[in-house]
Amino acid sequence: MAPRVSIITGAGSGSGRALAQLLSRRGDAIVLVGRRQDRLDETATRCTGPTLVRAADCRGHAAAQEVVRAALHTFGRIDTLVNGAGVAPLVALEATTEELLIDTFAVNAFGPAALIHRCWGTFVAQGCGRIVNLSTLGTTDPFEGYFAYAAAKSALDSMTRSAAREGKRHGIVAFSINFGCVDTEMLRKNFSTAHIPAERTHSPEAAAAFIQPFVDGERDGDSGQCVPMPSP
């Protein structure tokens, strides 16, 4: 059988890299997407199955279209889209600028929306497809300073619900996974271990293991849901 094909954004580090390694070990084909070529290349060296590296800033439809086109040209199908790329600026509400709002929504909401849109026709034609959006518990309980980040991820959660409802008749399922603290570079840009000790976080590998059943179809009954993975 041909390998299952997953597009993973944010694959250059953190949970995205860990998930790519996990799925690749069993022979899945992985499309590694992120902004930095060097980090994606490093992820590719850790994968054992077929990989395609696409350095792209998927904030808009042109980049999303190119990623999907390349995935289909190389592997012939797309089984799962994992929207894992994100930015989380920690900025007080009164210091939030228009530029920061636009950038935060572009990465966390508009980019995933573009990829969902570009994958949609393929999923419909196949009669199946999975969308896994990596989100945050901050959508309901944000840290102070996450005015823009939490709002952008809330928009992503809403897209999950819409995609699940519209996709049901086509065999398409969608989920948001609302993480607590995962010990990634993005978290540590904002919080030192003095503020959030390592023991209060999940490792990227633990986050990847939590995501895997959603990719495998074991959690299809939760389509449309925002599934929490609280901090330890």
Image (tube, rainbow, N blue to C red):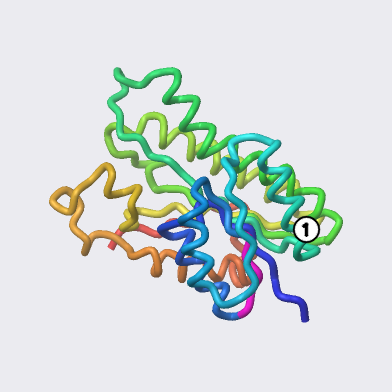
Instruction: Residue 41: give x, y in percent of width and height.
Output: 51, 61
> Foreground residue, 57 or 175?
57
- Asked whether 7 falls inside the magenta stretch, the response is no
Quadrant where the image shows the N terminus: bottom right
Quadrant where the image shows the C terminus: bottom left
Helix, strand, or loop for circle 1? helix
Q: Quadrant of residue 215?
A: bottom right
Total labels drawn: 1
> Foreground residue, 225 or 105?
105
The reply, left or right, for residue 46 in relation to residue 94 is right
Evaluate whether residue 138 shows in this view.
yes
Q: Amino acid at mark 1?
A: Leu
Magenta stretch bounds: 27-31
User: Which residue is denoted by mark 1 in the rendering?
Assistant: 72
Q: What's the residue at 59%, 67% (across, down)? A: 219
- Asked whether 29 falls inside the magenta stretch, the response is yes
Q: What's the residue at 59%, 45% (across, down)? A: 56
